[in-house]
Amino acid sequence: MKKLLIISSMLFTCVYGIGQTQQAAKPAVQKYPEREKMTPGMTEIWEPEVKIIQPGVTNSDAPSDAIVLFNGTDVNSEWTDMQGNPTKWIVKDGALISVRGAGYIKSKRKFGSFQLHIEWKTPSEVTGESQGRGNSGVFLQELYEIQVLDSYDNRTYRNGQAASMYKQYAPLVNVCRKPGEWQTYDVIYTAPTFRNDSTVYATPPKVTVLQNGVLVQNNVVLRGPTEYIGIPEYFIKKHGPGSIELQDHGNPVAFRNIWIREL
Ligand code: MG
């Protein structure tokens, strides 16, 4: 019995001892250095300095880093007809005017994402109605039309009036000036991207438009290239940079102060 007590006592001591050792082996609570107290300078980024450019005298004028696509005098240096020949559109009083039957014109240069400024004027002499009055258009990358139309007191389908992304998005408001008055579009366009193995957009094209300084398209996501008939096709031919195109829709619409900044 005495022996048994001694053995039990030894066992207890041993187990307890191990327990004590294990406890002692526990890592101490790690202490991290105190976080440095934030100062205003810690969130200030100085380098590299933001590129300096010169703004235009007015918002119609090209800033210093823009490519001028029409300067009021010469159309042939930056534009051709759709076959690559000199266009029959005319230059008059500093404006580039669409000529019925001359066809679309396209910029010689091709662009990906960009900021575009363009001014347009529908004829002061009002003829026609709905889509037949002062119709033209600005095509982005040759595929996506921002409608140009005399939409002053001229009802048409809402997704086909001036400043619509034609048949995809109506403008947020109708901020059109009277026919015969100059109007502006300022466009921010983000080109689509494609996966290597697919003709579905990896990221679709997106467009923001201000007309006469007012937001009319707010970063809208395009479903596909503009279609006159049918639903825009989401599965399309992959494309890279494309021209700006201006539409001949049979009406003598005038353009001026066209400049673009690549993004
Ligand atoms: Mg049009």
Image (cartoon, helix red, strand yellow):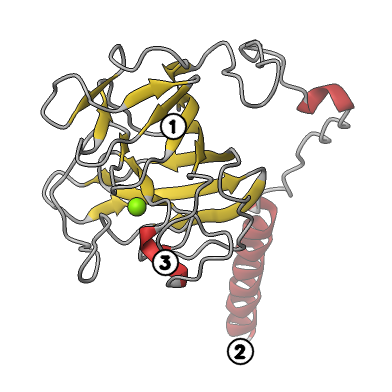
> Residue 213: which quarter of the image?
top right
Kindly state the secondary structure of the residue where label 1 is placed: strand
Foreground disc of the pair 2, 1: 1
Identified at 22% across, 62% down, the residue is 234
Quadrant where the N terminus lies? bottom right
Query: Mark 2 or 3 closer to N-term?
Result: 2
Query: Mark 1 or 3 closer to N-term?
Result: 1
**Label ID, residue 130:** 3
Q: In this picture, is 249 found above or below 67?
A: below
Closer-to-camera residue (181/127): 127
**Label ID, residue 1:** 2
Camera sees residue 241: no
Q: Is residue 57 left or right of residue 69?
A: right
Q: Residues within 10 Å of mark 3 (few under 14, many from 20)?
A: some
Distance between mark 1 and mark 3 Cα atoms: 30 Å
Q: Residues within 10 Å of mark 1 (few under 14, many from 20)?
A: some
Q: Is residue 125 left or right of residue 26?
A: left
Kindly state the secondary structure of the residue where label 3 is placed: helix
Distance between mark 2 and mark 3 Cα atoms: 114 Å
Identified at 45% across, 53% down, the residue is 149
Amino acid carrying label 3: it is Ser
**Label ID, residue 114:** 1
Amino acid carrying label 1: it is Phe
Query: Mark 2 or 1 closer to N-term?
Result: 2
Residue 114 position within the rendered picture, expressed as x and y whole percent measured from the top left: 44, 32
> Residue 248: which quarter of the image?
top left
Kindly state the secondary structure of the residue where label 2 is placed: loop
Labels 2 & 3 near each other (Cβ < 8 A): no
